[in-house]
Amino acid sequence: MKPVHLASIVFLAELGTACAEPVAPDARHDDLASSAVVVPQGSPHTAASGLFAQTGITSFDVRAAGPNTIIEQTAMGSLTGTLTGSFDDQLRVVIHPNGRFTTKFTIRCTCTVAGNTGVLDIQAEDDGELVSPTLARFAGRAVITGGSGDLSGLRGLLDIEGIVDVATGLATYAYIGRIRFLP
């Protein structure tokens, strides 16, 4: 889910440093896993999978910071699969001189999970790069850190992988992982 605005992709394209291989999550994301709460009691872990699809960018700011370009952006979208509903995200993208980018973001989902409704808070990170003049790829990890309503006890760890459409600046990304309701 890391939307990178069209101007950012153009910037990356001008660097000419893209590679054709997908970007895989790495050890830098292991610190996210430690923020997930694991308690012996509660429901068993359940497989989770689905898709985040951004539908609109609601704010966008770009600035230079030394050799890097920093993008602050908010977007909205829909969520399908095990987690179903709508979301808003706030993200910060750092585009490095070598053409790769890193993103940290927060997602707030108003959603339903296994018939339970509420709001989920999700923290995520990813790494990516431009792979063609019209496409950027990224991969990372997302942690469900808490929620409200019927989802207040839901926790989970999700791997994410997706693309950014250069023409729209919108991201679509799949998630797969495990969730658990805590008491």
Image (cartoon, rainbow, N blue to C red):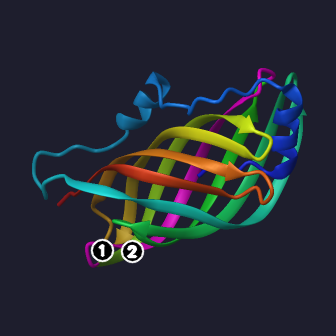
Decide whether the magenta segment is chiefly helix, strand or loop: strand
Residue at x-position 60% and y-position 68%: 77
- Which range of residues does the magenta coloring cover? 97-115
Residue at x-position 47% and y-position 25%: 26
The one nearer the camera, 161 or 109, is 161
The answer to whether residue 181 is left or right of residue 142 is left
| Residue at the left extreme of this rendering | 41
Whether tag 2 and tag 1 are in contact, CB under 8 A, the answer is: yes
The answer to whether residue 181 is left or right of residue 79 is left
CA distance separating discs 2 and 1: 5 Å
Q: Is residue 125 visible?
A: yes
Q: Quadrant of residue 48?
A: bottom left
Q: Earlier in the sequence, mark 2 or mark 1?
A: 2
Q: Secondary structure at mark 1?
A: loop
What residue sits right under mark 2 in the picture?
118
The total of numbered circles placed on residues is 2
Rendered location of residue 40, percent (x, y): 11, 45
Image quarter hosting the C terminus: bottom left
Q: Quadrant of residue 171?
A: bottom right
Q: Which mark is residue 150?
A: 1
